[in-house]
Amino acid sequence: MATPILEARSISKRYPGVLALSDVNFGLAAAEVHALCGENGAGKSTLIKVLGGVLPRSSYDGELLVNGTPVAFDSIRSAEAAGIAVIHQELALVDEMTVAENVFLGNEPQRFGFVNHGRMFDDALGLLGRVSLDVDPAAKVRDLGMGQKQLVEIARALAKNARILILDEPTSALTEREITTLLGIIKELRSSGVSSIYISHKLDEVFELSDRITVLRDGKTVFSSEKRSTDESSIVEHMVGRRVDELFPPAQSRPGEVLLRVEALSVAPRKGAPARLSDISFELRGGEVLGIGGLMGAGRSELLMHLFGCYGERIAGNVSFLGKPLAAHDPTRNVRDGIVLVTEDRKRYGLSLDATVGFNLSLSALPELCTGGFIDGDRELEKNRELSRTLSVKAASLEVRVGTLSGGNQQKVVLGRALMTNPKVVMLDEPTRGIDIGAKSEIYALIRQLGARGLGVILVSSELPELLGLADRIIMLSEGRMGGVFSAEGATQAELLRSAMAKKGAAAAAEHHG
């Protein structure tokens, strides 16, 4: 590689009692996207703070070079002066200001000692064009979507003549369409000579976008390679320190009695609308993990939400739980009877982000924690502590605001709240979305433990290896219908994908025994 545009040599950073970085080396070439991967706590955030000037030169050991010349950043501004801009996961925009004002915040064009608003808006238009963002520079940032705000941040970096962008989990809150747009913009910027450091746990994005990949683990550089010389399995192995096939614990249970029976179920979003789900049939037994897969829009989430009682009109078929009809529109009763749903969108539907960990854990089980109409605080605390230990929730205390936890620990709290109700059937909708590999491994172990305890588990996942590694049986949905039913043992990703793409009229429930 030619002289790196940015290089970190033997960087070490110690906090009281913690060695956050240990002899880390990292290099970024001109017009390159270099992905930085690692679990939470691997040292990524600390390295970003070093590269972006958040940590002054006097606070760490090692050396930074820009275009081969040693530099000593003592602030964010000094890093920006060297052409480095950091776009953090929590965006630093002012909602009540206009787009143009945010783009040039702290860097406004001047005329006779005053802000030149005309030039600022004209220049903002040009910068917004560079990031393909078609919005009025006079619009308030509060009125933009999350993906648009992300592009405003990039435009602001370009306004400061940044030649190096550091993007920290930039797609964590974006829709699929917004993600596609953002990745396209980063590729276009690379073509124009802008280099990027891309931090993400989403390996599909990493492999679509990056030229090189570096992995940190326990504060050390454990792997660095050109993308074409590695693969996802190798990256995961270096991140967690073990083989991918060791991530999924072995099954420890045998299917027992039928807990949930679904017969020829058809569901419409509302009365009079066409069916969203058609002719769905399956059984779920105690001790079994039933996987449900399919392409986006196949109806996976709708199926779980209907079984929970919060979606659609049942237009045909029957659903029974422990031999009795299951209420179609009564989630409260379903929870009381033993059916819980862990939602796909934990931040929107699964958690009260401004409340404490303890509040969130016990929220769904308050009726069982009450005595004489009042919450038994001692019993609630005891239950919360026990569950927090069981799930290995990493938080300073139960009084910490849950919104401050990592994605993996937030998901553990959501799962804990569901388990606090002592369910018999647990429905998990994308339970590992948005969390790092290490946290995924812990969630996998928990799912296996639920089966070993005799619970019935329905697992919806977009990741085929996850379905094959955890489920006993797999149903693939296609356009709201059953494209195939598989025994996980012996099934392949190719077979699952083919059934997910099956068209209406195909053999709806073809059995596959592996």
Image (cartoon, rainbow, N blue to C red):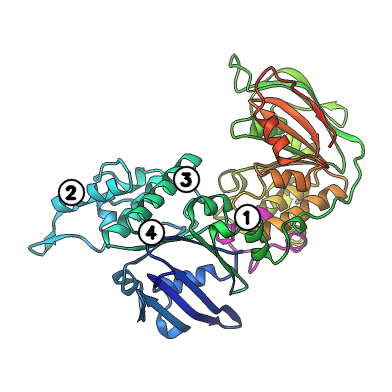
Alpha carbon separation for disc pair 4 and 1: 32 Å
> Quadrant of residue 74 in the image?
bottom left
Residue corresponding to mark 1 = 232
Q: Is residue 291 visible?
A: yes
Amino acid type, callout 3: Ile
Alpha-carbon neighbours of circle 4 within 10 Å: few (<14), some, or many (≥20)?
few
SS at mark 3 in the image? helix
Which segment did they paint magenta? 385-413
In the image, residue 306 lies in the stretch drawn in magenta? no
Residue tagged by mark 3? Answer: 179
Give the mark nearer the N terminus: 4 vs 1.
4
Instruction: Answer with mark 4 or mark 2, whichever residue precedes in sequence.
Output: 4
**What is the x, y in percent for residue 21?**
55, 77
Q: Quadrant of the C terminus?
A: top right
For the residue pair 222 and 343, the one nearer the viewer reads as 222
Query: Mark 3 vs mark 1: which is more N-terminal?
Result: 3
Residue that numbered label 4 is attached to = 92
Of callouts 2 and 3, the N-terminal one:
2
